[in-house]
Image: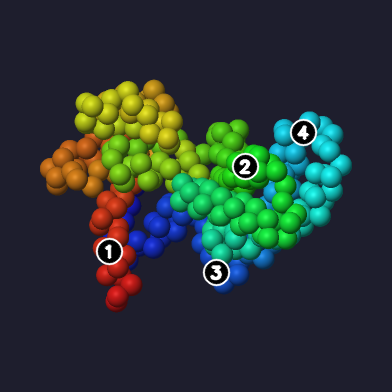
Amino acid sequence: MIFILRENILTVFSYDLIKGVFCDGDRIMINDGSILISKQTKIMIQILADVVSVFGAYICALILSYGAFPPADIFGLFLKTIGPTIAVYLIIFYLFTLYSSLWVSAGIDELIKTVFASACATILSYIIAIIFHTVLPLQVYIVAGLLVIMLVGFSRISYRILRRIIRRFYGSEYKRAMIIGAGETGTQVIRQLIESQSVMMRPVVIVDDDKRKQRTRIHGICVEGDHDDIGRLVDKYRINVIIFCISSATEAQRKEILEICFETSCEVKTVPGMKELFYTAQSTMIR
């Protein structure tokens, strides 16, 4: 069976395959309509994680600078300033909208934003401490700032890491997918299949006619042949689903490749290219 995804079922594709998670008011939902976690709960958990991260970063910075037992005056300043310091970090994180991003979509943009927010918060904390004559040694702020970036950044992507680990351990429950096309569309589909828990498919091999892409990997998945190898690779990797992702293919190329796919016993799906997906989505919204 083949699903040609166009205007009237575009939203089905973007919901079921591309995202698998959507927002409805203050709730984050999954594809069966049940509540995954409330927005307020997510924010509170993230704030708690940030508090622990900042506190732990400054404790570790003291230990790295002075050993397990820092001087009494330094430790006294730490106890006096850690509360306001944490408050500064939380305010800056809020201003940088770090509490507005979904865990499922945390990526490079969120990490870059985390780096800038943490750096700004560290500098501001140091300036405030100077103004109120409660400043710790400069090396403490430098070390703590670097540790905050690592800890806060890790907390933002830990959900995605955990989800990937779960998919690895329970991969037998998922359909094994072959991706045809190692371009932009194929890359996006592979990424979403790897990260989404609501789509019961796992990419295992990629096919592309570009010889330069042979034996390369996309998100850990190997490009292992061209369209003439589809039948062989279906048997080798026990493929259940073939997903056609070559938006630049001519009608003749598309027909030739899909005919090969139909000769297998696999379910066949096609997806529109990223440009086509964008412009179709716009025209749909305008209507």
Q: Position of residue 156 (x, y in %)?
A: 58, 49
The amino acid type found where label 3 is placed reads Asp
Nearer to us: label 1 or label 4: 4
User: Disc 4 on helix, strand or loop?
Assistant: helix
Work out how far the residue at label 3 is from the one at label 1, CA to CA, in angstroms.
23 Å
Question: In the rendered image, which residue does mark 1 sit on?
Answer: 280
Is label 3 in a helix, a strand or a loop?
Answer: strand
Q: Earlier in the sequence, mark 1 or mark 4?
A: 4
User: Is label 4 in contact with label 3 (beta carbons under 8 Å)?
Assistant: no
Instruction: Name the residue that disc number 4 marks.
Output: 66
Q: Earlier in the sequence, mark 4 or mark 3?
A: 3
Between marks 1 and 4, how big is the CA–CA gap?
A: 60 Å
Q: Which mark is residue 142?
A: 2
The answer to whether mark 4 and mark 2 are in CB contact below 8 A is: no
Lateral position of residue 62 relative to residue 254, left or right? right
Name which of mark 3 and mark 1 comes first in the sequence.
3
Q: Which residue is the extreme one toward the bottom? A: 287
